Every structure is written in structure tokens, then in C-alpha cells.
Image: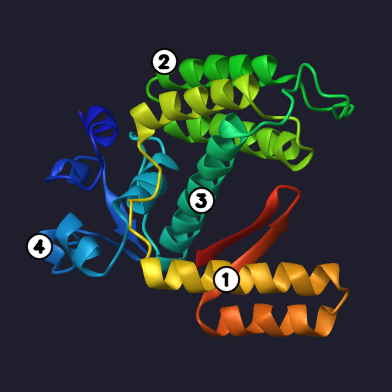
Amino acid sequence: PFCRAVLSGGLRGRSTSRRRSLRVPGTKVAKRSGNSLTGRDLQGAGVDPAAFRRLVASTHCRQRLNYTDDALSAAAEGVRRLGEFRDRLVEGAQGAGASLTTSSAPAAASVPPAPALVADLRRAFTAAMDDDVNTPQAVAALFTFVRLANRELDAGRLAGPDGAEALQALDWTMGVLDLLPSQRGRDPELAAWVEGRIAERTAARRQRDFARADAIRDELLGRGVELEDTPGGTRWRVK
């Protein structure tokens, strides 16, 4: 029953307690032990439900789940990566760049074309879920896809129809596991300020004023904004 509960939404309701057992270091979580842990507790602590679902998916539903803060943090980082990856796919699908099949840039020898990447994901993901809801294997297949597709995005090859196909495949897996971060709207004023600072930093770099560019990056970091320079431009996120 818990296998189905994991797929039905994670932190919603009491379904997440229906695993074989949940353990923290040294003891099992249970009401009679006075150390019960509920979805409401985690949400009250600001835990993204998707992060907890990612943590749960890392262990087969017939095995004990070892809960630690470090494990939850690692799960949250995985969820963040998925969110950023989806954003990149959206940009690629909407971009004007050439698709992988028409790009003049040579594909890395170890990376199959976009249709093959998608087919491999669908095949491996389906096989894992059909194997007694083997979510750890399904997640492994998902992150293999993320790693390989990111290489293609870095090279500017996963765009147009190929990007749209990859995006559709990712959303198909998320319809099962639901591991994308919860939507939190950006502060419009902060976003406008950040974009302005990024534009100034880009201009400084073009003028080879790297000291100024580094100072702007440090200024943004002081406001909790991290930058990532990619072939498609500078991306940012709030830590």
C-alpha cells in the first residue's frame, strides 16, 4: 500500500507513514517512542514536499527508510537540480537554436541523440516502476537522463523540437514521482534588480573589466543570489 501512497503525493495526508518503517539514527520513529514525525512537522520547518518525496523515493518501499537531516538536504539538492534542469529544457524548447539532429556541432561520442536519450529514459523508468515499484532505480534512470541531457544543453544542441521532446519526457516522469520543487514566486523588485546587475556584469566582462564583474557577483552573493554562467547566458537563483 505504501508503494501506491508514495506515488500519490508524498507529504499529503498520512499516507507517507505507511512504509515498512522509518528510522532516525539509533531508533525507529513511532508515536510510542515520543519521536513521531509528520508531514505537518516537515512543512512547518519549511521542507519542500518534493524534497521529502525525493528522500522517500531513494529507498524501496519495502525497505526501512533512514531519515537524517543530511539525507533530506541531499534530497532537496536533487530537487533543486531537477527544477533548474526543467527551466533549461523550457528555454531550449523555446529557443531559436538548431535541433540536435541538424546542429553542425558534433555530438559527444558517449551521448546518444535526443530521441535515443528520451527512449532510454522511458524504457529504464518504466522497467524500474514495473519491477515492484523500484523507485531508486527509476530515480537513477531519471538522473542519468538529466546528466546526459545537460551535456547536450551545454553544447547548444538540445533545442527546438528535441528540447520539447526531452521536456515532455521529463514531465512524464514527474507525473509519476512529482519531484519538481514547489513553485515559489520571485519578488518582482528583486528580480528586476538582479537582472539589472547581471546586465552590468555582462557589460563589464565584455569590456574585460573583470574586477568590476567579480565585484557585482560578490554583491549579488551578499544578497543570497547565486550566478551560473552558461553558453546560453547567465542564470541566477536565490540560495
Q: Earlier in the sequence, mark 4 or mark 1?
A: 4
Q: Which residue is drawn at 23% across and 59% down?
A: 29
Name the front one of labels 1 and 2: 1
Please identify the quarter of the rendering in which residue 201 is found: bottom right
Name the front one of labels 2 and 3: 3
Name the front one of labels 1 and 3: 1
Please identify the quarter of the rendering in which residue 1 is found: top left
Q: Is residue 178 visible?
A: yes
Please say if 89 is above or below 209: above
> Which residue has dot 3 on it?
78
Q: Is mark 4 on a helix, strand or loop?
A: helix
> Which residue has dot 4 on it?
32
Tell me residue 20's x, y (percent). Answer: 26, 40
* Colour setting: rainbow
Please identify the quarter of the rendering in which residue 117 is found: top right
Q: Which of marks 4 and 2 is nearer the N terminus?
A: 4
What label does residue 196 carry, if any?
1
Name the front one of labels 4 and 2: 2
Disc 2 crowd, CA 10 A, few/some/many (<14, 14-19, 20+):
few
C-alpha span from label 4 to label 2: 35 Å
Tell me residue 83's x, y (percent). Answer: 48, 47
Please state which amino acid type lies under the numbered disc 3.
Gly
C-alpha span from label 1 to label 3: 29 Å
